[in-house]
Image (tube, rainbow, N blue to C red):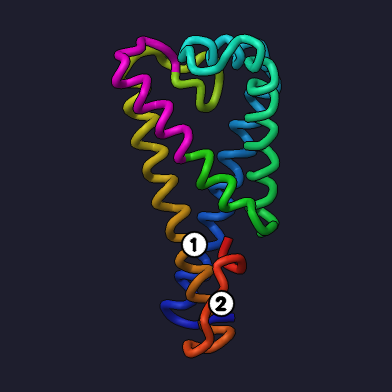
Amino acid sequence: MPSGLNTITFWSYHLLRVLMGGIFIYSGAVKLLDVKGFARMISLYELVPDQLLAPVALGLPALELLAGIGILFEIPGALSAIFAMLIMFCSILWYGILKDLDIDCGCFSTAELKGQNSLRQALYRDFVMIAGCCYLYLYRFLRIRRELGASVPVKFIKII
């Protein structure tokens, strides 16, 4: 068990990992329970062709759910999947803000508050989660570096 400041970073790492995993599990599960509603939500952004709407409406929440479970159990690639999804979500939310879309964000349900303010709040929330991902990456890098020794180069694949 680490001591002092290391104990704080140890527990903050695990707490953040569980929190982010829970968010993605909840988000994916809610959308999977209402796939048709989520498909309608996606269609309002007008970014996905109609023939791909059903696979995206089913696949994206399933990926969120699996990545959330993966980060809980520290399965390699789960953090990278969450990071990539957050970047994609930020891009889509930014697009919605720029196009002045008056629609729901669709992040946690199909019945969120409508409007630009909702999109902005979701964008800021995603920025905070991206910062959380960066903290998790940094912690993993430092942990591996400590385990291997500072003189040994850390392979990128061990961090993701």
Magenta stretch secondary structure, dominant: helix
Seen in the image, is 20 located left or right of residue 114? right
Residue contact between numbered discs 1 and 2, judged by CB atoms under 8 Å: no
Q: Based on the displayed image, in which of its 4 quarters is residue 121 positioned? A: top left
Q: Identify the residue position indicated by label 2 in the image.
A: 144
Q: Nearer the viewer, residue 39 or 19?
A: 39
- Marker disc for residue 157: none
Secondary structure category for the residue under label 1: helix
Q: Which residue: 61% across, 11% down?
A: 37
Height in image: 113 above or below 157? above
Q: Position of residue 115 (x, y in %)?
A: 35, 13
Q: Is residue 78 above or below residue 47?
A: below
Q: Position of residue 96 (x, y in %)?
A: 37, 19
Around disc 1, counting alpha carbons within 10 Å, would you say few (fewer than 14), some (14 to 19), or many (20 or more)? Answer: some
Q: For the residues marked 1 and 2, what is the alpha-carbon distance in whole angstroms?
A: 11 Å
What residue is at 49 percent from the left and 60 percent from the top? Answer: 136
Q: Which stretch did the figure color magenta?
A: 87-104
Please tell me whether residue 74 is drawn above or below residue 121 in the rendered image. Answer: below
Above or below: residue 143 compared with residue 88: below
Kind of residue indicated by mark 2 = Ile
**Amino acid at dot 1:** Tyr
Q: Helix, strand or loop at disc 2?
A: helix
Question: Looking at the rendering, in which quadrant would you find the C terminus?
Answer: bottom right
Q: Position of residue 149 (x, y in %)?
A: 53, 89
Indicate left or right for 123 with 133 as reference: left
Please report whichever mark, 1 or 2, sits nearer to the chain's N-terminal start: 1
Q: Which residue is mark 1?
A: 137
